[in-house]
Each structure stands twice: as structure tokens, then as C-alpha cells.
Amino acid sequence: MNNSEKLGFTRRGLLSIFAATVVTAAPTYSHAFGLLRGAGDVRRVKMYSGRTGESIDTIYWAEGEYIPEVMNEITHFMRDWRTNDIKPIDHRTVDRMAAAHSLLDVTEPYMLLSGYRCPSTNAMLRASSRGVARNSLHLKGQAADLRLKSRSVSQMAKAAEACASGGVGRYLHSNFVHMDCGPIRYWGG
């Protein structure tokens, strides 16, 4: 047992205390996966779901490492809300979301519209919309559809595109941006 355990501190508890006092600086990077340099050695994600009423505001990476318990919480949060099916969310997608959020310089959390989608949900959405891909990265836990009240689709997409990695889709009529960790590509108008 180490000294922090003797005093009743856990790594997660210390990170929570640290999170309350840290101010994350804007990232400087040329690619999203070298992101958040100079950000106090932490990465944070803030989201809420209007579908489930849940919210998450957490540091998921600290001291050069992803925090497995927190990544599990993010995976649960980003589950298919229609079926409660879960698939691990790719850390690169979370990094992309966090980097774009930081570039937007907002305190408002993202509204998560869609994270992981099970095959039956994707098929149902595909049948009712031309904008749903048959082999969507949502099926692999590698995509998120997000909205911010304080920023336009164009502003969000530009921040995501500045990360120079993955896909960015603009859905103006539905007022959301798709971000994924697949090949670099941009669509929508």
C-alpha cells in the first residue's frame, strides 16, 4: 500500500481534484493525434445526451495515458441509446472531439446525438435517411454526431477540420456535425 492509499486518496480521486483546478489551454498541433500539447497534460471531454438525460464531464487522459475506467464510462455514455448496446469507443474519436471543443473555446458541453450504433439501429436510420452510410463508422464506435447551441455547424466543422485527421460531415438542416477517426474526408454544405 502506498502513501496516497494510506491517506484515502486514489489516482482517480486525485485526478478529480486536479480537474477542478486545471484550466486547459488551446492545443497546438498539426494532426489531431498529437493534440492538446501544452494543455496541462490532461484531456477532457464534456457532453450531455438529450435522449437519456445523462451528462459526462471528465478527464480521460492524464500524464500520457488514457484512463481505462474513464474510457469505459465514455463508452457507456456513447452507447446506442435505442438498444443500450455498447461497443468500445475509439480513443481517437474522443481525442478529435476534445481537440475541436478546445479550439472552439467554449465551456458548453457537446450535445451527443449519436455515438455507437448497433447494426439494427443503423439499418433503421439508413432506411429513413440518405445521409446514413451502410458501413458507418458509428458501427465500429469510431464516430460521433454532435451539436453545440453556441456554435454553428460551420464553426464546429472548421474546428474539426483543423485537426487534419478523420472525417467531418456538415449536416446543416439537422444542425449537427459528424466527427470520426477514419480517413481524412469532408462532406456536406
Image: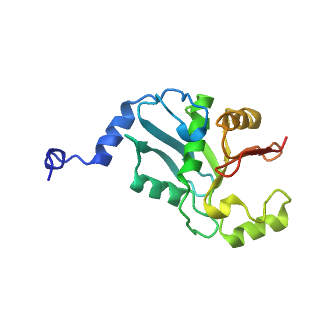
Tell me residue 166's x, y (percent): 67, 46
In the displayed structure image, the side of residue 186 where residue 130 appears, left or right: right
Q: Residue at x 50, y 54 (%)?
A: 74
* Quadrant housing the C terminus: top right
Q: Is residue 57 above or below residue 138?
A: above
- Which residue ends up furthest to the bottom in the rendered image? 120
Tell me residue 118's x, y (percent): 65, 69
Determine which quarter of the picture holds residue 161: top right
Is residue 124 among what the camera can see? Answer: yes
Tell me residue 56's x, y (percent): 50, 48
In the displayed structure image, the side of residue 124 where residue 76 appears, left or right: left
Determine which quarter of the picture holds residue 23: top left
In the displayed structure image, the side of residue 53 where residue 24 appears, left or right: left
Q: Nearer the viewer, residue 189 or 66?
A: 66
Q: How many marks?
A: 0
Report the coloring of the rendering. Answer: rainbow
Determine which quarter of the picture holds residue 156: top right
In the displayed structure image, the side of residue 55 where residue 135 appears, left or right: right
Q: Nearer the viewer, residue 107 or 28?
A: 28
Q: Nearer the viewer, residue 39 or 175?
A: 39
Tell me residue 170's x, y (percent): 78, 43
Q: Residue at x 59, y 28 (%)?
A: 105
Is residue 170 among what the camera can see? Answer: no
